[in-house]
Amino acid sequence: MAGIVVLWVAAVALIGYLVYFRYNVAYSGHGRFDFDTFVRAARRVEAGMSPYPRDRQYVYPPFVALLMAPFAHANPRHLWHVWIALVIVAPLVGVGAFVASHASRLSAWLCPLLLAFCAFSVLYTGYWPMSRELYLGQIDTFVFSMLVLATLAARRARELGRSAWIGVAALIKVWPLAFGLSLLQRGVRRRRGAIALLVAAVVAMPLSALIAWGPSAVRGFLANVFDAHSQPIVNDSVWGAPKLLFSRSGLARPMFVSEPLELLAWAILALWVVGLLVVALRTAGDPALCTWNVIFCVILLLPVAHRQYAILVLPLLWTWGVNLLTEGVNLSDGLVIAVVVGWWLLQLKAWPYYGSSRAISSVRYCVPFFADMIACTASVIGARAATLRATRAEGSTSAANVGEGALLPRARRLRCLWSHEVLRADQDDSGNRPDQRDGTADHEQVVHCAGEARPDRGDDRRAKSRWDR
């Protein structure tokens, strides 16, 4: 017990050091480009004007400006200090939610180690995407926390919760709405209400601008969002890399100039990522892992993808790490983990970005993008392989454990199997760990999930399944 307490103290101390160091470096920084954009928009709102018509740089929903408006006339230096503190603390909310959601699957001494590892991976001073985030004063870490909470809801089969958190993220930035594609995963139930909730978030953005500032604000909002699809900067997406490699972009030295090769590269890369997206959605398995894979694919398909967006899919590293700790090592998962760890290590280097010399080869600019492509491919294929293994295991035991449930569609059976595995990892109402239970309640929960009549065991509190909740 004392050793576990020491581990928790050490984990909290490490997080405190990382926060302190990050804050002091950002405190004395000179970036603040996006932060200044937010402040200008907030001052216009505070003055009763729309944040859109005069500032094409503000490409966000009106809620960011509305929330900052009460503080618009504070000393910008003091406001900057509070802002970077929030940007640093925001990912820790996601880290805490992730660790809490997996705590029941891990032994007591692994939980503080997981907390330290997750916090270190995002706040380590050499992690360049986070450095870029703080330099600009961006808001991606707030979106990050919302996405972690969305995947937590997905893991618990609460589709409305997943949709709600994605909708909140879309009220901070517009394009996270595309992450709602994860609701189309094979086997997801009650998706209509979740999709309706996302549609409400889409309507809320222009409607709030219309109510606050009239039709001109809606036109300004839509114009700003549309104009943002083309920016004269390095773009880590399937559309940006070919432009750097095979055209005179003015940002880097191309390999050689060839418009046909540029168009061919666009087509190949786009079709590849769309194929990965389809495979991810057709894989009936861990809904949280599917959500992260969909997020990765969407980022690669964005018209403009910035390097700091890598923060948004960092939990892929954590998810595969937890799977390694809880399910053991096999060849396919080991390869995926090796690739994802290599992807994170690659981001510890400050690769050329916009503002760097135009004489630098475009290949060096594109290294992070191709690392993203490889990591996304490995994760999607790894998730598919894990589902196929679960299918074989479920097929060999379905007659004994599921009975008539074997007649259900395969996607539904796999979702039931996944819910059963998550439920086995959770503590029961009496506080027992999974290794302290017998197999009776587990069998009853699988049978009930498959659609058979619930056994009449009212005195056994463990027979209450997640589907009943």
Image (tube, rainbow, N blue to C red):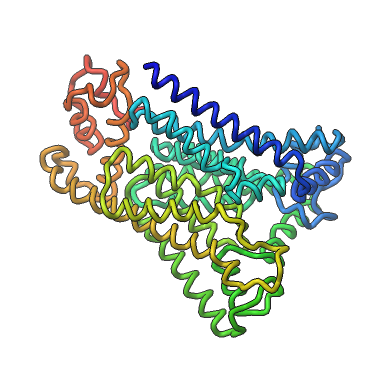
Residue 2: x, y in percent? 39, 16
Picture layout, residue 137 above or below residue 426: below
Give the residue at x 40% y 42%.
190
> For residue 48, what is the image quadrant?
top right
> For residue 445, what is the image quadrant?
top left
> For residue 16, what is the image quadrant?
top right
Most foreground residue, 432 or 9: 9
Residue farthest along the left direction in this orientation = 400
Most foreground residue, 114 or 92: 114
Residue 291: x, y in percent? 44, 48
- Tell me the quadrant of the picture where the N terminus can be found: top left
Residue 204 showing in the rendered view: no
Most foreground residue, 451 or 69: 69
Picture layout, residue 88 above or below residue 353: above
Residue 9: x, y in percent? 49, 22
Q: Is residue 379 left or right of residue 41?
A: left
Give the residue at x 78% y 47%.
30
Give the residue at x 19% y 45%.
394
Image mark count: 0
Picture layout, residue 436 above or below residue 401: above
Residue 210: x, y in percent? 76, 47
Most foreground residue, 26 or 58: 26
Residue 348 showing in the rendered view: yes
Give the residue at x 38% y 46%.
320
